[in-house]
Image: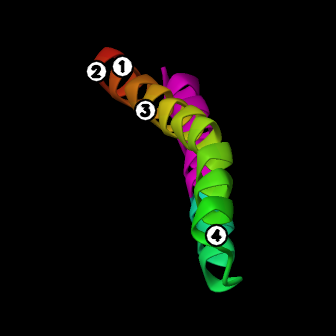
Amino acid sequence: MEMLVWAGALVSLGGLAGLVWCILKVWRARRAGLSDEELRAAVRAVVPLNMGALFLSVIGLMMVVVGVMLG
């Protein structure tokens, strides 16, 4: 079960990296001085990636919890 914990930690870190990337992407768009409509389009493009990264992080944390409980 130790492998499940480590695999879950890696998956969770991948999701966390995706979340950080989404934050930086939107932060750069805000600092670029885009118009309101362009900023909305930039944020709208990042939302699916943000949800995917969040899902990946949650799955990784679930793997860690299951590995700890079974091990």
Q: Which mark is residue 24?
A: 4
Q: Are marks 2 and 1 in contact (CB under 8 Å)?
A: yes
Image side of residue 9 versus residue 10, left or right: left
Within 10 Å of disc 4 (Cα), the crowding (few <14, some 14-19, many 20+) is few
Task: Choose top left, top right, bottom left or bottom right for residue 45.
Answer: top right
Q: What's the amino acid at mark 1? A: Val
Magenta region includes residue 13:
yes
Residue lying farthest to the left in this orientation:
69
Which stretch is magenta?
1-19
Q: Which mark is residue 58?
A: 3
- Label 4 to label 3: alpha-carbon separation: 20 Å
Name the residue tied to disc 1: 66
In the picture shown, does residue 4 fall above or below 11?
Answer: above
Within 10 Å of disc 2 (Cα), the crowding (few <14, some 14-19, many 20+) is few
Where residue 49 appears, x then y in whole percent? 64, 40
Q: Are marks 3 and 2 in contact (CB under 8 Å)?
A: no
Where residue 41 appears, x then y in whole percent? 66, 52
